[in-house]
Every structure is written in structure tokens, then in C-alpha cells.
Image (cartoon, coloured by chain):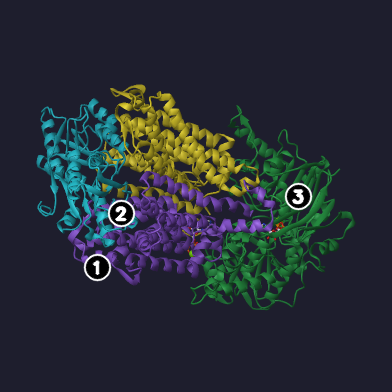
Chain colours: A cyan, B yellow, C purple, D green
Amino acid sequence: AQSKIAVITPYLSQPGTQFYVEAFQAAAADKDWDVNVIDTAGDVAAVISRIEDMVTQNVDAIVVNVDPSQVSAGLQAAADAAIPVVGMDAGSDPLLVTNVTSNGYAMAAETSTYVADRIDGEGNVVMFVFEAFPPVQVRSVVADAVFGNFPDIKVLDRVTPDVADGGIADSRAKMEAILAANPEPGSIKAVWAAWDQPALGALQAIEAAGRQDEGVVITGIDANPQAREAIASGGNFEATVAQDFKGIGAAAADVVSRVLAGDEIKQGVVYVPTKLITIANATAD
Amino acid sequence: MRNVFSIFATVAPQVNIMLTLLRRYGTLIGFAAILLFFWISLPDTFMTARNWLNISQQMSMLIVVAAGMTIVMVMGDFDLSVGSMASLAGIAVAVLFTVDLPIWAAVSLALMVGLVGGAINGVLISFIGILPFVATLATLTMLSGLAFVVSGGKTISGRVIPEGFSSFARGGLSLGEWGGVAITLPNLTLVAIVIVALVWVLLEQTTFGRRLYAIGGNIEAAHLSGVAVRKLKLIAFALTGSTAALAGIMYASRVASANPTQGSSLMLNAIAGVFLGSTFSEHGEPRVLGTILGVLILGILDNGLTQLSVDSYIRQILVGGIIILAVSTSSLTKHLRS
Amino acid sequence: MRNVFSIFATVAPQVNIMLTLLRRYGTLIGFAAILLFFWISLPDTFMTARNWLNISQQMSMLIVVAAGMTIVMVMGDFDLSVGSMASLAGIAVAVLFTVDLPIWAAVSLALMVGLVGGAINGVLISFIGILPFVATLATLTMLSGLAFVVSGGKTISGRVIPEGFSSFARGGLSLGEWGGVAITLPNLTLVAIVIVALVWVLLEQTTFGRRLYAIGGNIEAAHLSGVAVRKLKLIAFALTGSTAALAGIMYASRVASANPTQGSSLMLNAIAGVFLGSTFSEHGEPRVLGTILGVLILGILDNGLTQLSVDSYIRQILVGGIIILAVSTSSLTKHLRS
Amino acid sequence: MPLLALKNVTKAYGGVPALRGVNMDISPGEIHALMGENGAGKSTLIKILAGVVSADSADIRIDGQPQNIDNPQTAHRLGLRFIHQEFNVVPALSVAENIFLGRVYPRRSGLFVDWRRLNDAASKTLDRLGITHIDPRRPLGSLTLGDQMLVRISSAFIGQAGTPAKLYVLDEPTASLSREESKRLFDVLRELRGGGASVLYVSHRLDEIMSICDRATVIRDGRSIDTGQIADITHDDLVTLMIGRRVEDAYPPRVGAPAVHTAFRAEHLAIRGGKSLSFDVRAGEIFGIAGLANVGQRNVLRTLFGDLPAASGAMHLAGAPYRPKSPADAWRAGVGYVPRERRSEGLILSRPIFENTSLPHLARQSRWRSFLTPRREQKSAVAQGELVRLKAAGPTQRVRELSGGNQQKVVFAKALAGEVKLLLLDEPTRGVDIGAKFDIYTLIREMAARGMGVVLVSSDLPELLGMADNIAVMRDSAITHVLLAADLDEERLLNLCYGRTTG
Ligand SMILES: Nc1ncnc2c1ncn2[C@@H]1O[C@H](COP(=O)(O)OP(=O)(O)OP(=O)(O)O)[C@@H](O)[C@H]1O
Ligand SMILES: Nc1ncnc2c1ncn2[C@@H]1O[C@H](COP(=O)(O)OP(=O)(O)OP(=O)(O)O)[C@@H](O)[C@H]1O
Ligand SMILES: [Mg+2]
Ligand SMILES: [Mg+2]
């Protein structure tokens, strides 16, 4: 019979998630799986609930996209019912078959060292972070370490924007206030953002303030289309890191089909390579 | 008052009785139809003890918050801060674990946070006289900021959360076997049932509760008759704060971690549950059993539609539409009252 | 009613006048103090035309939604669906661009979506008789689902958004130079000013507005005094929906993209602005100028505290605390009226 | 020693004095009337005594002991029981719960409400007023207005251990009662007096005062003017004391006969729950409707006013067909309405006086029917206010801040502010003082003389007899008789209302 697979995520409305879910669905279509994609709109406890529902439905495998340590109750329920659960950009956990993801630490290292190099290791940097979300939180840990290692880099502000609106508008408002408070040219050397939306907001603020010629370096992470376009146009937004979302989705589907076939997966994590995106390769896919 | 139904106003008494039934039970009948639909479409998985216990466990935190919310909404007030309060209490209990407090002590202290936070809401509203919306929105912001500060903005999870704490949410009361499957009443469901029972007694069977209804019905009359409006408001808000904290602790136990935003979806859903539930009562006043029904309906719709593999976005549209349809039956006929 | 201030009840008339002033202007005085504080702490950057134009532009979308929200809140109702409506309208305009509609046509159609969506709210509430909270919560869910379905859940950006559309938000009306810097009144600010002026005229200078206030005061008496309650409610909700859609379009122009959740923070902030603003009016009723002040206060606090590099979490706590302090002055003294 | 002694009670609202120094005392075992025109300060004084409004200065002694009554609980503990003027009930709660509002309910195990004892106690209290037809478990909102009032009154008479009642204070309790109900109330009051308790009684109905009170205190403009034995004073002197001038007659004389052409005609009009009604109101005629409580008078007015649909039949206004679909249509056609319950149906308490009076006539008073002209509205409100002797700080004062009788005058001013062809009045002078009443009656007569038709529903038979030209008697939602007022007296009218043919 057709295999039934459930994909459960609290973050479907985020651009990255959509890409790997789509890639997963595309792979699933080839394999003739019946895929049920479930979004809990930000509610993590609801992910547990949905896992339980899927256990009730006796699906063949579950793919989750959430910090597994927060849904262990659900993972346990699946384990008790002998339903395999694969992490897709989730986190490592003994209850997961494996976790297919990009290396968040590595991505943050790429952009933060890019910033440090570009500003010659000195000047004021504004950071946009979001620590309540574990995959984004690990990025700022690395960036903090990198900037901390340069004695002349000063983190001027560490802003947690309101993400309810997607992150662009509130980041822009925050950046505008910071620009107003630091009016001298050169008083802000760089903006490091833990993901692309705040970088885009910061870019808009800098352009609106007419300060695009001060050479403020902006970096993001995720390489969403809007970010790629901004980088390609040669403005202050200089770099981001492309996760291979489609690769993650496809690799997760691959893992699922191996599990269904009865293979044992030994690696606790499957890393899918990432790529630094600058003006040189922004328009290439 | 005339309306689309006014032609019925002069019709035979049997029809009138039918309309009265529709008005009182319209919403219920609507949802019964939906249950039936799910049952038929999901013959093997929907109407099972397993599924219902699951739903009850999933909804338990929301049920606790909504029951608490009913207490202040009976007086015609709101508490917007319950979500932040739940997050803060979850963070508080987790942070207290990091300093190696025993479970009972950490839980009690976190409950105290809820009681005190709720009492502060009460003071702002009843003694200082700030509108409930403004006051609880301000405390929402403050409590959420506090949750971020206390946690450093991070999710607290892993070994700091004692096994005894997270296993509570996984455990339950064995109810024996049913159809060859062991049935367990989850502990979280049990907590929710106890809270609902307590709130029910409080609101429906004590002078305190009846006075809250009097305040909600006509605050001026209540005041003139010697009801100590301010004191009661303060107590009511303190109770709502405590239930919010309890829900936050339950949530932390269920996800074996605490995160400064994890309660944020509770507020709107709790208020929605109370309002939806109030359409079941004859005069439209909030009542705790109605609230629970309202909350369960939201949960059941989610469960059934998810099981039917309805796309998440379409599910949203359907949930909204079904609520409108179900509520319309009783609302339309309610016009006939006058 | 007595209260903590009752000792003042017997004092000299001068004190009484002072208290009356405090009551009316307490919140304002509180916020003036905050402005002064920011001015002193940020001498070069806070009180500049530049910064204020920035704030006005950042707040312009919220101002439009809040002005629209005032219309229904004057009647004592709510519209929870404005955020989803804004998101949907943003998505709608962007999707219409993908089929190469000219800007004016896409914008008009997106505004129509708002009008129709608002009118549906109005029908549900005034003709079917569903509680505003339940009805607009249901449409919130439905509109949000619709925004996701229409956009496929994705952010629409890039070349499909015509340059003319996104440059509108970047452009403005040149106001000449000031201190050597060219000062431009942003187009978005201009739109907000126009909307506020229109809503002000509507609510304060027309029979329509007067009747809405009458409905808010006593719906039954208004009905018996010849106010066509239902028709007016319907129109009011349709207007609120339209302003929400306009805000969504402004938002899309500002961020040069559209995302199915981008309006979601608008609802709570708009309601907060109306309530906060209502503390400025003598009898506590919502008035559009008060609303705008309320909204601006929220924006200014954010701006000033960000400029002072206050930690994001601490900022939340401060914003909540400052609101409570400022509102308390007028609330406490308001008790003295009776 | 007096039971209660008040000395130099003063109170100002936002700088405007309401009480400028009231002195009075109440002896044990007396029924004491508190009298004064609308806005004199009676209700304010009572609210101070009840601990719901704080006085600016007051010396209150009970049994010679100075007392500081700063909340309703204290007042209750001191043995004071109140029925306040405004209609303060909780419609969604049951009758029994309304009776026990603010009191501790009977309980089981010290915690749970003992519903059976609660309902029994409520029944007993109602019995005392001779009320047996009200089920204490029903929601109060489902009762008729008169019954709601009775429930509220009975709440003052519940006994509770530990706090024996010494003084009952009733602020215009009979305003919405029928005469039988009032009589029963008076019996209870006399019985309480017999038991040694005292009563402070406020009413604008002088006949009631003359018949049940022992002494009276008159206040004017916030000052106590005089206290004396009722037995020693005449009706006219009391009026003069209260309002500072003489009022010769209760009702102004009729000026000529009504015209022959009809202002309004109802043909086989089927009202809700009733049979078909037919009647004419001629231009200049005051058409009275008499009947016991709730026999359909209200539905007749509501049908005429477009608020209830008529299942069949036709109406004509000034000769033209009249088919109102809503109150808005009715106002537009020139029909004005003074509803029975001023606070819930007549007024927007939170808005200024002028916004209330102009609301039904807004389009006509506005530029291009859409843009407000507040100056004009205010001027017109002032003019209307003068006609009804409204006592207010100005047209922008909030209606909530007016005394009960003055609120009623605003409802009246509102109905008269437009071009009225037909005026529908439901108990229009409830709570209005005797001087203002006369002026309002005069006003109605003058407007009638100019061709307006008036339909007057009233439970006050002397008012009907004094004002109406023709009187229709209603029973069971049907008109049983239409008679010339001049041919009737009170007794005969009452008999007709009861359906008794004798007398
Ligand atoms: N007696 C009443 N009690 C409470 N609310 C009322 C009452 N009458 C009217 N309303 C409110 O006003 C609304 C209807 O007002 P409206 O004036 O439009 O009614 P209508 O004139 O009877 O109907 P139509 O729209 O057909 O003219 C109701 O939905 C209700 O909210
Ligand atoms: N809340 C208030 N705010 C301002 N003024 C008030 C308020 N309540 C009463 N007043 C004023 O106090 C005065 C006395 O009012 P009060 O209600 O005591 O009169 P009253 O003698 O009971 O009249 P009535 O016979 O009409 O009931 C009036 O001028 C009234 O306008
Ligand atoms: Mg109408
Ligand atoms: Mg009075």
C-alpha cells in the first residue's frame, strides 16, 4: 500500500521551511507517498499533539522540524508505536532516526568572519539576533565569539526584533533609531544579522537614511530570494549563506525511504553543505 | 426587533419551541454534526478512547488558562497577560531547577509568581482604575520582557529539567483496558479536570462567584448593593494569574523545557474559548462549562481536520467558517427573543 | 466611590483644580516628561525633524489601522481581523502584480478586498448577531488562511513588485531644508495624515460619527432614537476593513514584498493605541486624535529606548512600566470625579 | 434621642454644590418624607448615607453615636437598608439572587450556596409584599418592569441575623408601581413602623406623602428648608415650600375642543400578542390609554412607533398612509416617543444633554444633512430645556450627572425637539417634580392646541383623567372601551380596567 508520511513543523510560513518541505514533497511524489504536511503556527507543544495524532493514525514515518528536546513526549509516543521519526533541520536526539540539516555554527562563522575581515577587525557592529529559536540562537553564539576575538570590534547593539510581522519592518524601525542615535559617518561599520529579514530591514533603513555610501557591511543567513536580489544589486548587503534547502528536503526524503526499506541509519546527523553567497554568485542558483 | 426571522414571530407555538431549542442549542447541534462527520470520515481513528484522551491532554493547558480567564470575563473584564504569565512561570520553574530546588518548591514558587502577577493586575485595574485592556497589555509586555531577561532569551532544556518533572506530563492514571489497548488518563488531563471543577464550584456555587456575575451584569447595581467590587476584582485577577502560571508549568512539563515565548498562543485562544462558550448560555454570559466546550471544539476541529490531511492553510479557513456557521444558528434565532 | 485619594476630597478648591488638570492631562504630562527625558539624554538625535519623520513613517501603517479601529471601538465593538486583512491585502496587491495589472488597478482591487471583508464582518455582527469578538476572530483565521493559500505561503518579492509601487513608500514631499539637511515628508506619513483627517471628520463632524457614539453609549436608546443601528454597524466595519487593507498595501510598498503574516502585529497594537488614547479623553471614550497619540507614544518609547541602546528585553519591561505609570496619574485622579 | 441625626451635610460634584448644608433628624418609629424639587439633592443625601458617595463634610449620628459611613457594608452593619432611585438590578441573575445582592447567600458547609434556602428566603420576602406570582428562580430580566421594581424593593426587607434593620430608606420606590402594588408597599412600611423601625421616604406623589408619612423635611437647592408634622401642613403649603411658588391646579385647563380632522388612525391593527385595534386620534387630542400593568399598552406604542411589526392592519398619519419599518421611519414621519424606562431606553447617559436631545432630529439639524452644527444643537437644547424646566449646568453636561427627574425631562425635551405630529408618551412624568410636571402638561396642551396628536399611556389615573380628552381602556391586549374623559371618574375607570361593569 501507499506509505503514509507526516511532516510536522511549527514554522511553515518561514521561507526556508517552505523550500525543504517542497523538495520533500517532490521527492515523495516520485516515491508515491501520501504526505500530510502539518503546520502548528509557532506552537511547539502542538507539535507533540500532532505527533500523537499521527501515531493514532498509524502513519509509516514522521518528519519533524523542531527542537527535538522540546517534543520528546511526542517522540516517545512514536517510539512506543515503533514509528520512525526523522529530523529535518531539527536537532540531534536519540529518539530521532537522524537529523538532516545545515551546520548552523559553520554558517554563522562564515558570515561573522566575513564581517570581521571586511571591516579590518575594527569598528562598531550591530547584531540582530533571536535567541528564543534554537537554530538561530546557535548562530549568534558563534558570531559573539568571533567578534569577541577582535579587541577593536565593538558590538554597539544586540537587537531582538519583533518577528510577528516577518521581521523586516520592525528591524527597519530599530535600525532607523540606531542610525539616528549614531549620526556620524562611519560610526556603524557593519550589521550582522542571524537571518536575512533583519538584514533586509537594516538595508532599507540605511538606504532611507541616505547613508548607503558609508560602506556599512550587512550580512544575513539563509539566502532567501529577496536577499539574493539585494546582494546582486551591489549595495550594502554583501553576504549571506545559502543553505541547500532543497538538498535538505531531498536528503530527508532519502533517509525516510531507507528507513521504510528497513535500513539502519548510523549517523546521528546528516549535514548538507552550505555556500557563502556574495555578489559573485548571487544570481547563480 | 425585526430581522430575517421576523416572519416566524407570528407562527405556531410548535415552531416557536423549535426555535427556542435552536437558539439554546444551535451551536451545539452544529458541532454535533461536525463530530458525526469526523466519525464517519475517520471510522477507525476518530471516535477512539485513545484519540479523545490525546485531545484532552493536548488541550489541558489551554483548558486551565481558559477556565481562569472565565473568572475575570464573568465580570466583563479581560486578562491579556495570561500568555506571558504562562511563559514566565515556565521559565521560572526551569530556572529554579537550575539552582537545584526540589520540584515541589520550584512549582510552588512559580505558582506564587502567577498569584502575585495576577494580584498586580488586580490592583492596577480595581484600585488604580486602569482599563483592564491597557493594564494587562502593559503587564503582558513586562512579564514577557521579564521571561526573556530571566532566561537570557534562551530555551532552557536538557538535564537541568529533572526527570520527575517531565515524566509527570508523560504519566497518567491507568483506567484499564479497552478494546485490547491500555487506556491511561493523562496527568495533565487530570489537572485540567480538577481546575475546571474548582472554577465551576467557585463561580456557580459560592457567594464569591455569584457576586462576580453580579458585577458583570451591572457593576453599578452591585456596588450600590454593597458588593465590595474592588476587593473581588483583585482576587479574581489573582486567581486568573495563578491558573495561567499553572498552565505554564504544565506546558514546561510537557515539552520538558521552557522558552520565553511558549505561552503566547494561549491568550487569544482562551478568550476565544470563553466567547465561543458564552454562546451556549441562555443569556450569553460566560460560564466555565461552556468555556471548556468552546475550547474543546477548537481542539476537535484541529484534530479532525489534521487527521483528514487537510492542508494547514485550508484548515484555517475551514475552522473560521465552521465556527461562523455553528454560531450563526443560535445567533440568528436569538434575535427572536425580544 | 471612595479610594486612596479620598483624603483629598475635602481640600481646598485650588487643589481640586490641580487634580482636575491631572485627571485630564495626567497621561499627557507623564509622556511629556518622557519626551523631555529622551531629549536631554539624546540631545543631538532625538528632537530632530529627521527622527520624527522617521518615526512618523514607521508608525504610518499602524496609525491607519488604529484610526480605522477607532471607528468600530467607538460603538464598543472590536475588529480582531485587521492584521490578517492587512496581510491579505498586501498579498493580494502583490499577486495582482504577478498577473501584470497596473498599479492603480491592483491597489484598488486590494482595497476592495478590505471593503468586502469588512462588510462581511459587519453582516456577521449586525445582521446575524454574532459577538464581534467571535465573528472577527473567525474572519481573522479565515483571512489569514486565505493569505497563505493565495501566496502559497511564500513571500512575494523581487521583480514582480513594480518599481513604481515600492518607490512610493521611499518617496515623499520635499519640505525644504532645515539645518542644512533636506527634509522630506514621507508619502506614507502623508497617507496616514490624510486618513486620520478623514476619520476625524467622520467621527467628530458628521451625523454618522455622532450616531456611532450614540450606539456605543446605549444601543437600545440609540435604536429607539431613530439610529439605524445595523446599517451603521455594517458601514463602520466595512470602513475598518478598508483601512486595514490600505495599511497592508502601505506595508507591502514599504518592504517591497508581501508575506502572509506581515500584518499580524497590527491588531493588538491598534487596539492598545485606541485604549491608551481613550485615557486622554475626559469621559474615557475613544477619539481618533487620542488614538493617534496613543500609537505615537508606543512608537516614541520604542525609538527613544532603542536609541539609548537599551537591551531589547529590558526595553519591553520599561515600555510596560512607563505605560502603567503614565496612565496611573490620570486614572487615580479620575476616581475623584464622583 | 433621634435614631438618625444629620448635621451640615455638604457635597459638591466637580466644584458644583449639590448639598450646601442639610440638617435633619429621624425619630425611631416614624415614616419621614424627604421632599424637594428635581435636583434638590435628595438622592445625593441618600447616597451619602448609604456610603456610596462621599460627602465633603457631614456629621452623621446614629443613636447619638457619630458614624463614618464610608462603604455600603458599613451602612448595612449599622442597620440601614436602601432602595436607590435608579433601576439597579442584574437582569441575568435570578430573582432570588437579586434579592440577596450584596448579602451573604445561605450556605451549606459554610461554602456552597444553598439554593433551596436561598429561594425559600426570597419567596418569603416577596410574600411579605403580597407577591406570590413571581418564581424566585426566574431570571429577573424576564419579569415585567413593575415586577422587577417589586423584587428590588423586597430586597430591602430580607432579614439577616446579626444586623437588625433600624431605618429603611426608599428613593421614589413607587415610580413604576401600580396603585395596588404601592398600597401593599405602604402596608409593609406601616407594619415596619409598628415594629419600631423608621422609614425615610422620597416621592414626588404628594398624596402618598400625605397619607403615609408622619413628618417631612423639605430641601431646596441643597439646603434643608423646614421640617414639620404632616398633620400640621397643607398640600399647597408643602408645594410652595418645595418649589418656592404656588401651583394652583395639578393640571392645566383644556383650551378648546380638539379639531375634527384626525392626526392618526389605526385600522384593524394587529399588535403582538393581541387582537386588532382600531382608533382615531384627532389633531389636538390627547388620547389616553388606561389599563392594569402590562395589558399591551407598551406594544401598542411600539407598533405605532415602528419598533414592532403589525401582522395586519393599516395606519394613517395626517391623512397619509403610515407604515414605519423602524423607529427611524417613525421619527422621520414626525412621530415622537417618550419610552417608559429613561435610563435603558431613553438616554445615552455617557453623552451630553444636547447630543441626546438632537439624536432623532440629527439630519435635519445638520448642514447638508451630514455635517454637525453643535452650536445650533446646543441652542435648541437650551430652548427645549427651558420649556421643561431642566436644571443642568449647561447643554454639554453629561446626562449621567443629572438628577433622576431632570433625566426624565431630557427624554421629554428630545421628543419635542423636532416637528412632532404625533407624540407617544409612556409614563412620561415619572419622577418629575410637581412644578415641572405642571409645566410639562402645559406644554403638551399648547402643542396639542397647535394640531399635534398625543397618545398617553399612564398608570396614574388622575393624570389620565386630568389630561386626556378620550380614554381607551385596555385589557388583554385589546381595547375594551373608548370613553370621554369628562364622563369618567377614578373609581369608574379603575373598575373598567379590572373588567368590572358595576360602579
Ligand atoms: N430591543 C433591543 N435590545 C437590544 N438591542 C437592540 C434592540 N433593538 C435593536 N437592537 C440592536 O440594534 C440592531 C438592529 O437595529 P436596527 O435599528 O437596524 O433594527 P430594525 O430597525 O429593527 O431593523 P431594520 O434594519 O430592518 O430596519 C440589533 O441587531 C441590535 O444589536
Ligand atoms: N455624578 C454626578 N456628577 C455631577 N453632578 C451630579 C451627579 N449626581 C448628581 N449631581 C447633581 O447634584 C444635584 C442633586 O442631584 P440629586 O440626584 O440628589 O437630586 P434629587 O433631589 O434626587 O432629584 P430628583 O427628584 O430629580 O431625583 C443635581 O444638580 C445633579 O445634577
Ligand atoms: Mg432600522
Ligand atoms: Mg433623586
Work out whether residue B25 or residue A68 is closer to the camera in this orientation and state it. A68
The amino acid type, in three-letter code, at marker 3 is: Ala
* Residue at left offset 43%, top offset 68%: C197
Q: Is residue C279 visible?
A: no
Marks 2/1 in contact by CB < 8 Å: the verdict is no
Comparing marks 3 and 1, which lies closer to the viewer? 3
SS assignment at label 2: helix
Q: Is residue A8 left or right of residue B210?
A: left
The tag on residue A175 is 2
* Residue at left offset 42%, top offset 65%: C196
Comparing marks 3 and 2, which lies closer to the viewer? 2
Q: Is residue A20 left or right of residue B57?
A: left
- How packed mark 2 is, by other alpha carbons closer than 10 Å (few <14, some 14-19, many 20 or more), is many
Quadrant in the picture for residue D202: bottom right
Quadrant (top left, top right, bottom left, bottom right) of the N terminus of chain A: top left
The answer to whether the beta carbon of the residue marked 3 is less than 8 Å from any atom of ligand 2 is no
- How packed mark 3 is, by other alpha carbons closer than 10 Å (few <14, some 14-19, many 20 or more), is many
Work out whether residue A12 or residue C208 is closer to the camera in this orientation and state it. A12
Chain letter for mark 2: A
The tag on residue D58 is 3
Chain letter for mark 1: C
The tag on residue C103 is 1
SS assignment at label 3: strand
Chain letter for mark 3: D
C-alpha separation, residue under disc 3 versus residue under disc 2: 61 Å
Locate residue D420, reporting x and y percent: 61, 73
C-alpha separation, residue under disc 2 versus residue under disc 1: 29 Å
Comparing marks 2 and 1, which lies closer to the viewer? 2
Locate residue D40, reporting x and y percent: 74, 59
User: From this viewpoint, which residue is outermost toward the right?
Assistant: D232
